[in-house]
Amino acid sequence: MSPPRQLPLPPLPPPPPPGWRLISLLLGFWIALESAAQGNSDTDALNVLLIIVDDLRPSLGCYGDKLVRSPNIDQLASHSIVFQNAFAQQAVCAPSRVSFLTGRRPDTTHLYDFNSYWRVHSGNFSTIPQYFKENGYMTMSVGKVFHPGISSNHSDDSPYSWSFPPYHPSSEKYENTKTCRGKDGKLHANLLCPVDVADVPEGTLPDKQSTEEAIRLLEKLKSSVSPFFLAVGYHKPHIPFRYPKEFQKLYPLENITLAPDPNVPEGLPAVAYNPWMDIREREDVQALNISVPFGPIPVDFQRKIRQSYFASVSYLDTQVGHLLSALDDLHLANNTIIAFTSDHGWALGEHGEWAKYSNFDVTTRVPLMFYVPGKTAPPVGEGEKLFLYRDPFDVSSELMKPGRLVTDLVELVSLFPTLTGFAGLPVPPWCPIPSFHVELCREGQNLQKHLQPHDLEEDPYFLGNSRDSIAYSQYPRPADFPQWNSDKPSLKDIKIMGYSIRTIDYRYTVWVGFNPGEFRANFSDIHAGELYFVDSDPLQDHNVYNDSQHGGLPHSLKP
């Protein structure tokens, strides 16, 4: 395999992005210029609103969760095609986001940690917003879309992906500082951090600021001749659980149960376990003096973690609700595609684990839905509202059922071709192997076919039978036994890679030797394996891999 070519890049790092007022002025100037040339525009093009949430598992009413109150996301789902079994390709922020925003798997982007920029490290791969930008769209980023730092060149991949400098809320710099009021009256850097918003620095929170900025942009974009691609990234429910304290009232502790399988399974290989080191770094968790690596966390604190996660989800839901209501008020619902997803899930005590950093369903499964005007819902009539804001504290509101459910297994790497297909743009071709030299191609299926299977051109890679659909994920480890860097090993420290296959019948994971210098897995060097059957073991607690080795692989796993 020839090494990827080096490419000219923006300065590293670039100057900080300007504030929203300057962005607003630039945007207004752009719109004024294009209005003079509107005869050259395609007025039928659909806009795109892409909402990306951090660490959100499908703990939502529209995914069958009976406890969590998420009425605004549920309302979006009622007008959307909803994928019940969507999976991330790696359960950690930067690798997952680079994967689905480029349409390439981690073994192609060569990003398994946070410490490299794919355009230098792997290949000059186009991104979703870059492709829309090159096809005449005005592209904008608000909040956490790309993971900040080296993995997006300290610039959120500007200027390649965005027409204007990305916006980051000013209050996000306080997320990991001592802003949590403890029982002692002092401020701490805690995991659990319900706050009085009026008392926090700047009197606001990052996701509130992102919603306000996104709405400001939509108000400007309403008069734009060019179609827009607006990506909005929300921080919650990422840790710390820093959210308005009133949302705790939705989840009284007496109503909070433990995970159905809160203990480390006996047959779990040590290499598969994540020791949730980032949780342990928080002051309130340190005070518990929990043993490393397996814990466990005291039962009462487990309930408090779950309570704060669910409260964070409901807080997030209100921000989504305000954003979609504004889109509706601006009469943009009839010509704007809305995609909603998360970068990966989050374990809430299942298998004795917390956070992400594994190949289990609880960390790789994500919500994924698409609202397509006129296709997933009828056009909005004069005076009608599709996305009326719904208050999660209103106990009288009824659960809204998803519009169209798809149970086939799908992957986040399919986001690129699916969005382009729904927008009417040419869908990028399938990637050759290898594809490091190819700037524009895809490694995921076009999920558009699930919406209109008879009207679209046949795709030889489309798996029409749900029993044949497959989702792949992977996770790196530095050693066979959990240690301080097992959750987030740097590339140079990766010694083992866990490759996982999820089908409708089973999850099969094999942990093999890995050479980080050559990005090469050695499948003859097997360190451990996992095999869970969905029907008999839906929570993935009973590893029968060793049984299958003694008795031969089950028929469905034989090559």
Image: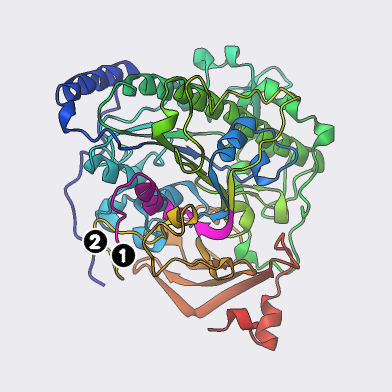
Q: Nearer the viewer, residue 232 or 172?
A: 232
Q: Is residue 277 left or right of residue 37?
A: right
Residue 55: x and y in percent read: 56, 43
User: Could you tell which of marks 2 and 1 lies nearer the N-terminus?
Assistant: 1
> Which residue is farthest bottom?
551
Which labelled disc corresponds to residue 431?
1
Q: Is label 2 in contact with label 1 (beta carbons under 8 Å)?
A: yes
| Residue ID at (34%, 51%) | 116
Residue furthest right as drawn: 254
Residue 180 x, y percent position in the rendering: 63, 23
Who is closer to the viewer here, 499 or 407?
407
Q: Find residue 438 and name its label.
A: 2
Q: Is 419 colored magenta in this rendering?
A: yes
Give the secondary structure at mark 2: loop
User: How many labels were placed on the picture?
Assistant: 2
The residue located at (68%, 38%) in the rendering is 285
Query: What number is the disc on residue 495?
Result: none
Circle 2: residue type: Val
298 falls in the magenta region? no
Apparent side of residue 38 relative to residue 471 in the rendered image (left or right): left
Q: Pinpoint residue 1: horizontal percent, then vertical percent.
A: 26, 72
Q: Give the extent of the magenta segment.
A: 406-430
Q: Residues within 10 Å of mark 1 (few under 14, many from 20)?
A: some
Which x, y percent locates residue 112?
A: 43, 56
Near mark 2 (Cα within 10 A), the count class, few <14, some 14-19 or many ≥20, is: some
Name the colouring of the figure. Answer: rainbow
Amino acid type, mark 1: Cys
Residue 294 in the image: above or below residue 56: below
Decide: is 115 above or below 220. below
